[in-house]
Image (cartoon, rainbow, N blue to C red):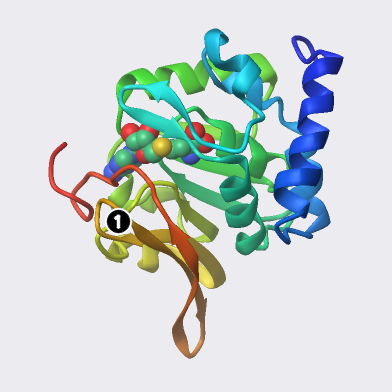
Amino acid sequence: MEGDSRRYQRQREAMVKNQIEARGVSDPKTLAAMRRVPRHLFVNEALMDQAYNDHPLPIGEQQTISQPYIVAMMTEALQVDEDDRVLEIGTGSGYQAAVLAEIAYRVYTIERNRTLYQNARKVFEQLGYYNVIPRYSDGTIGWREESPFDAIIITAGAPEIPKPLIDQLAMGGRMVIPVGSSLSQKMIKVVKDDQGIHQSELGGCRFVRLVGQYGWRDS
Ligand code: SAH
């Protein structure tokens, strides 16, 4: 892939081995996607050499690209299949959407910040992620016209699970969402079946706020 030098490929291999496999992520599809997506092309040029380090990075507009391990852990938890249609809330840099696009049939991704939305659009096009469909909107109300979704991922911290997103989850669908205060959250996995909704906890985390009608109010 253009702009993906051997040096970055080596850093990416090390990232997968030392940060992601070492912490217990084992799903082959997730690991393969993390090995493929050129994470350094989703950050500002000045930060490229830090792109494969074990922490989040600023992407402008006071937002961040998540730590690689968190991206992998959430991707694995979604149990994405090649036929699946996935909804992401919080496009940010576009990196998580690209990782999912390596596995899924199609990824719908919503961003409320216009600058980040526009930047991410360009990156998807430049890198050929034609199965990612970006939208500039409040993602807490979901994307009703394209629902239901086999998997929904929210990459910003919510005070509670937005009701519209539960409604737009397909039968048999999976959702992962950080829920809690604006300082710390628990990663919640939601599964929907004919009995209803089942929730489990995947551990602590810290995300920027999900701001919108069914999230935190204003910025
Ligand atoms: N998934 C991103 C990281 C996201 S950071 C990546 O891979 O880089 C969280 C993002 O959620 C921010 O860009 C923020 O603007 C966005 N966001 C917050 N509330 C939102 C909402 N209601 N709808 C859509 N995007 C939202």
Q: Observer-nearest residue: 141 or 72?
A: 72
Which residue shows up at 29% across the image and 47% down it? 210
Residue pictured at 51% horizontal, 39% vertical: 66
How far across and down, in percent of the image, does residue 148 sit? Answer: 48, 61
Q: Where is residue 216 drawn, in percent x and y?
A: 19, 50
Observer able to see residue 186: yes
Q: Position of residue 136 (x, y in %)?
A: 34, 30
**Image height check: is 45 above or below 121?**
above
Q: Is residue 125 visible?
A: no
SS under mark 1: loop
Question: Which residue is located at x 30 percent, y 56 percent?
Answer: 158
Task: Give above or below for 115 relative to 102.
Answer: above
- Figure quadrant of the C terminus: top left
Quadrant of the snapshot with the N terminus: top right
- Ligand 1 contact, mark 1 (Cβ < 8 Å): no
Is 122 displayed left or right of 17 in the figure? left
Q: Which residue is mark 1?
A: 158
The answer to whether residue 99 is left or right of residue 148 is right
Q: 144 or 88, which lies in front?
A: 88
**Is 119 located above or below residue 76 in the figure?**
above
Label 1: few (<14), some (14–19) or many (≥20) C-alpha neighbours in 10 Å: many
Give the amino acid type for the residue marked by disc 1 in the picture. Ala
Residue 140 location in percent, x, y? 29, 51
Find ligand 1 in the image and state its quadrant.
top left
Q: Residue at x 69, y 46 (%)?
A: 105
Which sits in the foreground, 165 or 79? 79
